[in-house]
Image (cartoon, grey):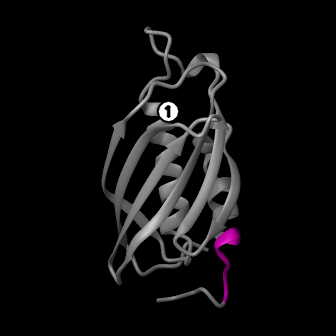
Amino acid sequence: MNNTNKTTAIEVVEEIMNRDNFSRWLGIKVLQAGEGYSKIQMEIRDEMLNGLGIVHGGIPFSLADSAFAFACNSRNNLSVAWDTSITFTKPSKLWDVLTAEAKELHNGKSTGLYIVTITNQRNEQVALFKGTCFRTAKPLI
C-alpha cells in the first residue's frame, strides 16, 4: 500500500518524533526527510560517554537507527527493523556533532535496504550502518 499521495515523508517523520521519547532524549534534529531518505543530527553530551571517555557505541547506533526508521517509514508504510549492523570507523568525543544520512538502496514490497553514513562536524566518517526493514503494509499515520 502506497500512501504517498495522502501523507508526506515530513509528516511521517514528525509523527514518529512526536511518539519517540528516546530520539528526543538524544537531542535529534531532523535536517531533511524525503521518500527513502533522511538526514538528522545530534550533539554528544557528557552522559553519552563510556568509561574510556569516548562516546558509547549505542549512541551512534541509535542515531543511525533513527535515521533508518525515518527513511524506511517515509512512505507511510509501517516498517520495522529486521536486521542491522554497524561498523565504527572513528571514535566520537564530547561535544562532537554527529550527522546521520540514510539512503535507500532497495525499496521492495515487503523489505527495504538502507545505508546510513554517520559523520562528525569535520565531515569525518565515524560509522557506517546497514539496515534491512520489514514492511507491514499498514499505514503509520
Amino acid at circle 1: Ile
| Label 1: how many Cα within 10 Å (few below 14, some 14–19, many 20+) | some
Which image quarter: residue 134? bottom left
* Residue 10 at x, y percent in the picture: 69, 69
Q: Quadrant of residue 51?
A: top left
In this image, 126 relative to 22: left or right?
left
Q: Residue at x 67, y 88 (%)?
A: 6
| Viewport quadrant of the C terminus | bottom right
Residue at horizontal 47 percent and vertical 67 percent from the top: 72
The answer to whether residue 6 is above or below residue 141 is below
Image x and y of residue 127, in percent: 43, 39
117 lies above or below 138: above
> How many numbered discs?
1
Task: Name the spot of residue 65 as percent of width and height, x first.
Answer: 46, 49
The residue segment tinted magenta is: 6-11
- Residue at x 55% of width, y 54% of height: 101
Taking the image as shown, residue 76 lies to the left or right of residue 65, namely right
Q: Is residue 107 magenta?
A: no
At x 66% / y 23%, what residue is drawn?
A: 95
Q: Which residue is mark 1?
A: 59
